[in-house]
Image (cartoon, coloured by chain):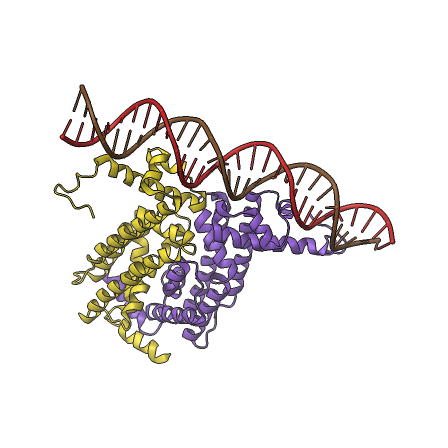
Chain colours: A yellow, B purple, C red, D brown
Amino acid sequence: MKVGVSPDTFPPRSHEAKRISVVDAAASVFCREGYAGANIDLIAAEAGVSRQTVYNHHGDKEKLFMAIVRDLTERCNAGIFATIATFPDQPADLEADLVAFAVRMNRNCICNRDGRFLRKLIQAEGERYPELFAEWREQGPGRTWSALAARFARLAYAGHLSIDDPDVAARQFLALVNAELQTTFMLGGIPTEEEVLRSATNGVRTFLAAFGRKKAAAARQAALAHA
Amino acid sequence: MKVGVSPDTFPPRSHEAKRISVVDAAASVFCREGYAGANIDLIAAEAGVSRQTVYNHHGDKEKLFMAIVRDLTERCNAGIFATIATFPDQPADLEADLVAFAVRMNRNCICNRDGRFLRKLIQAEGERYPELFAEWREQGPGRTWSALAARFARLAYAGHLSIDDPDVAARQFLALVNAELQTTFMLGGIPTEEEVLRSATNGVRTFLAAFGRKKAAAARQAALAHA
DNA sequence: ACAAATTTAGACAGGCTTGTCCAATTCGTC
DNA sequence: GACGAATTGGACAAGCCTGTCTAAATTTGT
């Protein structure tokens, strides 16, 4: 929208800076206090601006909330796709590469500020704003899991894995590498680097035991036949 | 406190009935609206009592909230341990029995009213009441996972599974059988019976591919040696 | 049927929050 | 240095919510 001869300078500099400041503070307060408990005065104070400035920029408590969610959704999706782009398509050491990928995924998308905030807002207010979070649902998990599934399918096609349903495998991969962080996530905490690494290591090990090419394939076929 | 010759009849009947009614309504409203957004008038109306009765029984909004959380925690833990007691220690058909167990676990503990409510309250207000939820953390996930790990260890000892670390296996089991329900949980929804069954089936299949006795053991050892 | 306890509806004060308005001040730009 | 736009602090009305109080109505046990 901002079309001008000299880009990025037309709107006054600190105007946009304050807007960002307000958005950041609002995300933090909405997360901490919930929608009803979030207090515009507190947001303004935390952003270092006056209450009137908050209203000037975003008009309304509800509009402000919507802006926050859209902002977080956009940034999180961008981060997730950027990280999926680093998927090890041609792994040197499959286990080590997948562990590293899982750690990146956690650090850059799930444990970082935006990820934690968006998750909490969705959990807390998702039912109240269906249309807002339906957008997230389609753009986020839907596209993300497909993209990840495509990478796993390619890895299987190249002979590194033995996978029947790449979509299922992708979801299970994410579930496994986060298996030991659930309690921490539940309480809104931030796992340590070591916890993230251990959960990813254990998760990838089990994932490869199930989907690895070597001998697991036989066991997997046996299990399927047995069912 | 209620010491009497004829137990359970000393306090008037509908007194306790109203108390339960208030607790149920409060759980629902706290969940839906968040702590700050929960409105005592609405709780009273939803419970079919007057506002004053709510105050007579629980004294305070915060005390009421505490009572709700304690109540839910207690009931959920009881349900979880009751369900763990149905773990297939001597499986006829390991895959089918584990799938059935996973479905029971989901239906009776995670997807039911108490489970969904407690999860949402912990996520939303956990940081605000650390001592309250610390109790849950120790009594809930801590003891639950240990108990489940013990069952898996017994299954491995009996030769049905090949497990190195039962605690890790137990957490991964739960993560796998819930892998496809994450998005639904996140938005507070209730998965259909079919979704629960499919997620459990896929999860158990992968779990057995990784920890099953037949040939996966060899693959697992290979993966370990390779790391 | 009686007496005690509980419940109810409504009014009420006190406090907090949202959103608006306005005059004074500061900031960025020419 | 001067102009215009943005920001500030504060006051303000309106509404909502909590928690208390009261008198009337209802329920309970005997």
Q: Is residue B6 visible?
A: yes
Q: Is residue A203 visible?
A: no
Residue found at x 30% / y 63%: A142
- Residue A203 percent location from the top left of the image: 31, 60
Q: Quadrant of the C terminus of chain A?
A: bottom left
* Quarter assignment of residue A205: bottom left
Residue found at x 25% / y 39%: A16
- Classify B156 as above or below B186: below
Name the outermost residue toward the bottom: A225
* Quarter assignment of residue B55: top right
- Classify A221 as above or below B1: below
- Residue B150 percent location from the top left of the image: 46, 61
Q: Is residue A5 left or right of residue A35?
A: left
Residue found at x 30% / y 38%: A21
Q: Nearer the viewer, residue C29 or B199?
A: C29
Q: Nearer the viewer, residue B224 or C21?
A: C21
Q: Is residue B141 left or right of residue A24?
A: right
* Quarter assignment of residue A155: bottom left
> How many numbered badges does the structure rendering display?
0
- Residue C16 percent location from the top left of the image: 49, 36
Q: Nearer the viewer, residue B17 or A220?
A: B17
- Residue B167 percent location from the top left of the image: 40, 58
